[in-house]
Amino acid sequence: MDLNPRSPCNPPKGFEELVAETLKAILTDGLIRTGDKVLLAISGGIDSVTLLFVLREIQKEIPFGLGLGHVNHQLRGEESSRDEQFILSLGEDLTLPVHVRRVDVAGYSSTTGLSIQHAARELRYQALMEILRQEGFTKIAVAHNLDDQIETFFLRIIKGTGLKGLSSIPIKRDAIIRPFLRMTRSRIEAYRERHNLPFVEDSSNRKILYERNFLRKKVLPLVEELNPSYRQRCASLLGDIEAENQIIDERVAAFLGRRSPVPRNGSVTVNARRLTELDKEARVRVIASIVAAVEPGVVPLRDHLEHICSILASPKPNLLTILPKGIQVVKAYGKLRFMKGEEKRGLSDPIVLLPGSNRIEQLALEIVVTRPRFVPVTFTENRKVALFDADKIGSLSVRSFRAGDRFVPLGLKALVKIKDFFIASKIPRTDRQTVPLVLSGEDIVWVGGLRIDERFKITAATTRTIKLTLKSIKRNKDDFAFRQCGP
């Protein structure tokens, strides 16, 4: 059988054109293989019912199992119940198994803040994947067609997107397959009419208050008047975009190390300079991948991605922006950090440090206070350890940075603002509240892990010392850590 995907359709003997073209797409793209068990997502409308009967014809060429999956959104009262009963009756007539799931779209929309359409889509795919896992299906077939693809193309342009978004609907992704994706709605409707296939109509499809319906009924008919072949022109453009996307995705995969970014405790950090070296489209895709990894389900708009790129390009070393769902994007000293939610860290009120181990949960630190028996002859180079002249030290406490804090850094003679010291040490603004400031009375004697105060250092005259040691402790699950990804 000659099924060259680039040649005109040569239907197998006894097959109508729509069936032959669908079979060609299935074989060319490897959508269904012998022995697969396919769950058809069926609403009862023209597209999904027609796909059902076309797939039954294709079973004559490719032996595979077939079942029906219907998700009742419970949004249209008696009409929703009518659709469900129609599918059950259709399955019984055709001796096919039917799997029905009822979902509370209105409640989910209210809880999540998603639109009714987006909430319905999320719950629908969740329900279908649940059926696939529970019933042993290998593929989920949905009846998206070329008109759906083109409508999505125009909607994405109107709302704002990039090349990735323009390619919109893939013919297959994981277990989801779309055998009708290259077929026009008119061809599908013509097949249904010729064979007098039963169907039910969703009354909401007639309402132009929905964006897609408005585009379908008001805008695209005018486009068709300008160019009756606009569908074919769009389809050709979508093919070019898909090819370009594959090239760009290869560059993205190379940057991310051939894997998706994996946040550790809600945070991902990348090298800002390396990111700016990517071409713009690859750069925004890396950023979108990280955002999606930090907060699954969030799809940043093109405006968000452009804004983050402007932060990268800015000469300012420290910048912060907040995306939907409270995702923070922080640029600080050559790094770009993506954090989930709003970090609440720091220690506003001092905590007294006692001899021995002091666990400071708010800073994810343990501070160990000891009194060595011998005075060291040299300073330690370990920044996590500090030694002081015990005769100069009073009651010790620890807290976080406050505006106006000053100390005399080791090796200097004058007071320096802690803020200026942080800047010189390249401590990101978002990290400054996590740096422990150890005080003796009201004086800052140690900017923990960075520098002690000149006035409290050990000298040749020191006879007794106090030693402080910083140790990290495991953060709570809601806290944040950092993971470097990319070159």
Image (cartoon, rainbow, N blue to C red):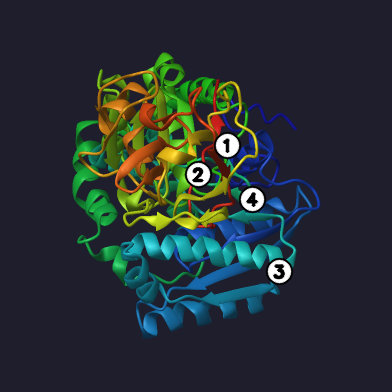
Q: Which residue is mark 3?
A: 134
* Residue positioned 35% across, 52% down in the render: 342
Q: Which mark is residue 260?
A: 1
Q: For residue 205, what is the image quadrant?
A: bottom left
Label 2 crowd (10 A; few <14 / some 14-19 / many >=20): many
Coordinates of residue 86 in the picture (x, y in percent)? 51, 78
Q: Earlier in the sequence, mark 4 or mark 3?
A: 3
* Residue positioned 34% across, 30% down in the render: 331
**SS type, badge 2:** helix
**SS type, badge 4:** loop
Residue type, numbered disc 4: Ala
* Residue positioned 51% across, 50% down in the render: 364
Q: Earlier in the sequence, mark 3 or mark 2?
A: 3
Relative placement, left or right, of 336 versus 213 is: right
CB of mark 3 within 8 Å of CB of mark 1?
A: no
Q: Earlier in the sequence, mark 4 or mark 2?
A: 4
Residue type, numbered disc 1: Ser
Q: For residue 51, what is the image quadrant?
A: bottom right
Coordinates of residue 268 in the picture (x, y in percent)? 49, 38
- How far apart are the alpha carbons under marks 4 and 3? 14 Å
Q: Which mark is residue 293?
A: 2
